[in-house]
Amino acid sequence: MILYAAILETIDSKKDAEILDIHKAYLQKYIDEGKIFAKGPFTDHSGGLVIYKVDSFEEAKKLAENDPAILEKSRTFTLKEWRSNIE
């Protein structure tokens, strides 16, 4: 199964804390739609990981780019195609 892993690195922790609830609500919408496989913060508080379960890299990129944490510039992201070997 091909998934898409977005590593979101915090660059403005103050702004990130301010928009955290909006960010979580945005992700919850796509969890409810089945487009997010997993998500969560890094334990070192440097950001978080979102694993998208969508049809293409382009779709995952669009979802990541429209995340409020990205739009508000509290985080940056790197997107990688990832192959799960769990069947």
Image (cartoon, rainbow, N blue to C red):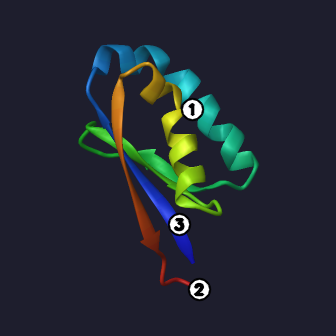
60 up-or-down from 73: above or below: below
Disc 3 residue crowd, few under 14, some 14–19, many 20+, Cα 10 Å: many
User: How far across and down, in percent of the image, does residue 8 sit?
Assistant: 36, 41
Disc 1 residue crowd, few under 14, some 14–19, many 20+, Cα 10 Å: some
Q: Earlier in the sequence, mark 2 or mark 3?
A: 3
The mark closer to the camera, 1 or 3, is 3
Do the CB atoms of the residues marked 2 and 1 lie less than 8 Å apart? no
Q: Which residue is mark 2?
A: 87
User: How far across and down, in percent of the image, does residue 86 sit?
Assistant: 52, 83
22 up-or-down from 18: above or below: below
Q: Amino acid at mark 2?
A: Glu
The mark closer to the camera, 2 or 3, is 3
Q: CA distance from mark 2 to mark 1?
A: 28 Å
Q: Which residue is mark 1?
A: 24
Q: CA distance from mark 1 to mark 3?
A: 20 Å
Q: Amino acid at mark 3?
A: Leu
Give left or right: position of 82 versus 75.
right
Q: Residue at x 62, y 32 (%)?
A: 26
Q: Amino acid at mark 1?
A: Lys
Q: Earlier in the sequence, mark 1 or mark 3?
A: 3
Q: Residue furthest front?
A: 58
Quarter occupied by the C terminus: bottom right
User: What is the secondary structure assignment of the residue under circle 2?
Assistant: loop
Q: Which residue is mark 3?
A: 3
User: What is the secondary structure assignment of the residue under circle 3?
Assistant: strand
User: How far across and down, in percent of the image, does residue 21 sit?
Assistant: 55, 23
Q: 12 or 57, which lies in front? A: 57
User: How far across and down, in percent of the image, does residue 65 sit?
Assistant: 49, 36
Q: 54 or 56, which lies in front? A: 56
Q: Residue at x 48, y 84 (%)?
A: 85
Give left or right: position of 37 versus 46.
right
